[in-house]
Image (tube, rainbow, N blue to C red):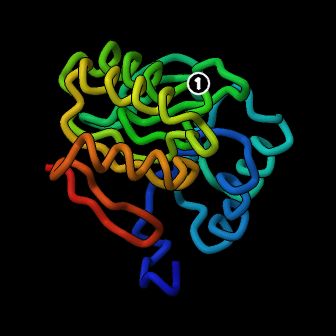
Amino acid sequence: MAQLAIDPDEIDAVVLSHIHGDHVGGLASFLQQNSNVTVYVPSSFPQSLKDEIKLCGARLEEVHQARELFPGVFTTGELDGKIKEQSLVVITGCAHPGVVNIVQKGKEVGKDKIHLVLGGFHLGGVSVARIESIIDDLLSLGIERVAPCHCSGDLARSLFQKDFHQNYVEFGVGQEISIP
């Protein structure tokens, strides 16, 4: 955060997608800088982590069901996959439940068109045919723009870029995106 010139005190909410260390590992250090936040976690998170969040002085919100967290910002609630995961509509963590499943749930929860799907699509090592099928599904769901990053894989990113053309967003750590 220091390298990106992000002031921890300007953050008032943290939404954790799933329990993997690369998604929760920096939380304790962050809470030492700013514990005046609400931390939204899937209900399935270990009690020890929930207790640690509260001990740091942060407010804990457990998420099980889909709901609106802030005006216009929705969570899918916990979705089953190899690992239970919540997504913001639609910013994925790693998309363990499947990016298409997340988008379908997002459309149901948000009751609106999804303009952008951003985040990890968990497609590293997946076949070209499977990735193309996922792209077709997202296009048929009316997704306008995609920004695959994190665990999406280079092959998936190149195929998404080919099919989404100017609606492909190159995205990664330290980049900002404005959502009107």
At a point 57% along the width and 27% down the height, the residue shown is 63
Which residue is nearer to you in this view: 67 or 179?
179
At a point 24% along the width and 18% down the height, the residue shown is 140
Tell me the element at label 1. Answer: loop
At a point 43% along the width and 77% down the height, the residue shown is 6
Using residue 88 as the reference point, say whether residue 153 is left or right of it.
right
| Count of residue discs | 1
Using residue 44 as the reference point, say whether residue 37 is left or right of it.
left
Using residue 122 as the reference point, say whether residue 7 is left or right of it.
left
Image quarter for residue 177? Answer: bottom left
To which residue does mark 1 refer?
A: 97
Please provide percent x and percent y for residue 34: 57, 68
In this view, 122 is above or below 43: below
Please provide percent x and percent y for residue 73: 32, 36
Please provide percent x and percent y for residue 85: 61, 30
Using residue 171 as the reference point, say whether residue 156 is left or right of it.
right
Which residue is nearer to you in this view: 23 or 6?
23
In this view, 76 is above or below 16: above
Q: Residue furthest top?
A: 108
Local crowd at mark 1 within 10 Å, few (<14), some, or many (≥20)?
Answer: many
Please provide percent x and percent y for residue 11: 44, 63
Q: Which amino acid does label 1 sit on?
A: Pro
In this view, 87 is above or below 59: above
At a point 36% along the width and 35% down the height, the residue shown is 90
